[in-house]
Amino acid sequence: MHPEPRHPHPAPAPAPGPASPSTPAPQVAVVVIGYNDRAHVGDAVRSALAQGPAVAEVIAVDDCSTDGSGELLDRLAAGEPRLRVVRLPVNSGGCGSPRNAGVDAARAPYVMFLDSDDVLPPGAVDALLTAATEAHAEVASGLCVRRELPSGREQPWQAPLYETPAVLARPAQRPRLVHDTLCVNKLYRTDFLRTHGIRFPEGRFLYEDFVFVARVLAASPRIALVPDRVYVWQVRRSAERLSLSLDRGRVENWTARLEASTLAYDILLGAGQKELARAARAKFLDHEVRMYVRELELRDAHYRRAWWEQTREHLAHYDAADWELNPAAPGRLLGRVLLESPEPRELPRLRELAARPARLLPPYARTPDGTPVWSAALPQVSLAPFLSRPVAELPLAVDAELRPRARVSLLRLRLHELYGKVAEVDPREVELHWQEREGDRTRGRTTAALTPSGADTWSAEVAVDLARLGSGTWDLRVALLFADGTRRETTAHALTGAGRLRRRAVPSAVHGVLLAQPYATHSGALALRVATGARGVLRVVRGRLRRLLH
């Protein structure tokens, strides 16, 4: 089957019949793209069709699949007049070309995008279309949630942008828009995209969303924001083939992200959107750099050197104003350390600073005149901006050690001073609880007193009932309470070495036996895996043996 011809101005869709006041007229084209995803593309298409009468057409663009996806789509289209199938003659290697083909084929006045392995939640199209039409906006945007599969746990994407409805006459009114680089949680006027020539990069171009969204913002559209859930981004980390955005194990992935980030900045700056361009550079430090630094210790020496060199070359183009914007932010500090270090260094400490929330571990060095600095080896990286920040915004460091025991295990916490800012507000207590990684359960919520344990530390001890936690993976959540009422939520750095993170089997009156393993996450935070009962312990042992054999 050949792809449908691409016309600059496709013929309009047939005029819809009269709609009742409560029924939206068919005005939206949903472009669904897919390649060799027969297992999921049907669900994506059905979720688009299920949006109701507001959807005039669903355009399924098959990127020359070889797994039967095209045939499946043809069968679906045979029984659904709103579904049209466009098949590209050769595989494009990316997501941009099929999306462009879908926009070219669209006849409806509005268009939105859906990937074959994701779904639209009920009411998504109505929410976006209502917002766009009522605000006379060229773009409407809503909340995307990342759904981890198979657990089903959901995490909102860029939630602060979508806390309340808003209408922006131009994007520069809210520079944080550059943080939402997704194209799929948005509805666009089709003629707006065509008039401004807004398209995705063609062919194999990773992070094509970065470029497309930058082109949208550069055209300065009127934008409506809604708090509704409008897109479910389904993350399958155990899939045989990771999605492009999750496959970060090769340095080529970072190279592609750098290319897309650079092009997005150039687009915004070239359109005179200086504030948005500067916000995009800040976002690169706060999001991209922090995410990859957290994983840098997991990579081999070749990856680390290449990543370090490419990042320093990219950051060398930042100007003084870029560094002056919120100089105490963790991303700015990471960037300055990278620039001043020709070779990879202090990766464990950088990983902790890249955590969310950030943690700055000792040593806390000073110059001879008393100025706080990153380290004695890098005195040119000043930490003086910390001195003017409230303690609730500082990257405070809390160490944690958990030793599983037969009855009640003991969790030891230690808070570090940070250039006098902690003592200044007098730490009093620590609140903590354990949060289930793949669910919503919390356990062991308690409060303990923080007492001085040295010249620059405060400590607390908390009993942990492992049997009450139960099976699962648990993350430790901590809140520091100060005398003036300040509250600082954070995580705790897992102390390593001397058998501190060893897996232990302990007797349990409730479960007979349980297996507990404290461990450090990719960002260095303390977490805990628990398996209960003989069956649970056996599953862990079998899994360990399988990994050793492979």
Image (cartoon, rainbow, N blue to C red):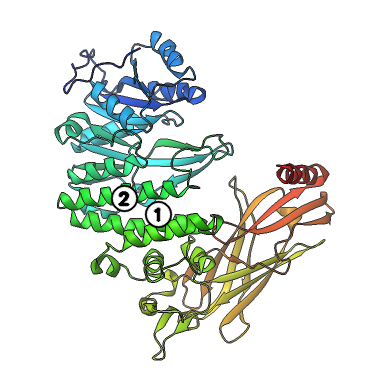
Q: Which residue is outermost to the top?
A: 78
Question: Does residue 5 sit above or below 480 in this rendering?
Answer: above
Q: Earlier in the sequence, mark 2 or mark 1?
A: 2
Residue pictured at 20% horizontal, 38% vertical: 135
Kind of residue at disc 2: Ser
Residue 48: % across, % down = 39, 24
* 251 or 115: nearer the viewer: 251
Q: Secondary structure at mark 1?
A: helix
User: Circle 1: is it few (<14), some (14-19), or many (20+) Cα within 10 Å?
Assistant: some
Q: Amino acid at mark 1?
A: Glu
Judging by the rendered image, the residue that carries numbered circle 1 is: 288
Q: Which mark is residue 261?
A: 2
The alpha-carbon separation of the residues under discs 2 and 1 comes to 9 Å
Query: Could you tell me residue 386's position as x and y percent?
Result: 39, 76
Quadrant in the rendering for residue 320: bottom left
State left or right for residue 337 relative to residue 297.
Answer: left
Q: Is residue 472 left or right of residue 184?
A: right
Residue closer to the observer: 168 or 242: 242
Seen at 64% across and 64% down, the residue is 446
Let me know if residue 52 appears in the view: no
